[in-house]
């Protein structure tokens, strides 16, 4: 699904920026290459896990996670978050916290792909019940389970937040 979502966004003119590694990140970079957009990888130097995937037009490597996260925050217009582990959750929580506390001024769309997974992991009812987040905080992100659903949410949000004009179809 990462390949398909990235390709659709790339075909719509959006560059794709990922963590640059294998799995979902590689899928998104591959989707960008299949489409007509730049494919950027923000790689992290860790001993055993990550090596840059081959689908990157631009490949940057970072020693520290916080610098890498800063680059995502600076350049991303949207976060599409597929199920993942601690690194994925770290990057997601950082962005949600920055949005919640209004520490970043630009609009960033956060889309959680795979609602069953994310609802189990995040357990929003418990966070709400215990007063750890407010009901308004649940509006900081969107959810999707299919490629067309994700693309439609992203396209609508990006057009709204960044005043991107739709290209007219040539006849």
Image: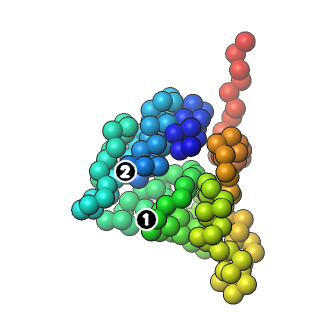
Nearer the observer, 37 or 47: 47
- Going from N to C along the chain, the mark reached first, 2 or 1, is 2
Q: How many marks?
A: 2
Residue 84 screen position, x and y as percent:
49, 61
Against 160, is 171 above or below? above
- Looking at the rendering, which quadrant does residue 104 occupy? bottom right
**Residue 107 seen in this snapshot:** no
Q: What is the quadrant of the N terminus in the image? A: top right
Q: Which residue does the image show at 66% across and 61% down from the upper left?
A: 116
Nearer the observer, 111 or 99: 111
Q: Which residue does the image show at 33% across and 38% down from the upper left?
A: 54
Nearer the observer, 52 or 70: 52
Residue 10 screen position, x and y as percent:
54, 35
Q: Which residue is mark 1?
A: 87
- Dot 2 falls on a residue whose secondary structure is loop
Residue 78 screen position, x and y as percent:
58, 52
Q: Which residue is mark 2?
A: 21
């Amino acid at each position: 699904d990462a390949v398909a979502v990235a390709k659709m966004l790339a075909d719509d003119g959006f560059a794709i920026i990922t963590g640059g590694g294998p799995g979902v990140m590689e899928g998104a970079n591959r989707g960008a290459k299949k489409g007509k957009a730049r494919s950027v990888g923000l790689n992290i130097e860790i001993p055993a896990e990550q090596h840059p995937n081959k689908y990157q037009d631009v490949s940057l490597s970072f020693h520290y996670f916080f610098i890498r996260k800063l680059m995502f925050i600076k350049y991303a217009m949207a976060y599409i978050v597929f199920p993942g582990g601690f690194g994925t959750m770290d990057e997601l929580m950082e962005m949600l916290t920055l949005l919640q506390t209004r520490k970043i001024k630009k609009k960033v769309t956060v889309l959680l792909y795979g609602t069953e997974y994310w609802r189990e992991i995040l357990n929003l009812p418990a966070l709400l019940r215990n007063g750890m987040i407010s009901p308004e905080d649940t509006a900081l992100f969107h959810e999707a389970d299919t490629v067309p659903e994700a693309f439609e949410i992203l396209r609508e949000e990006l057009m709204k937040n960044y005043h991107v004009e739709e290209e007219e179809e040539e006849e």
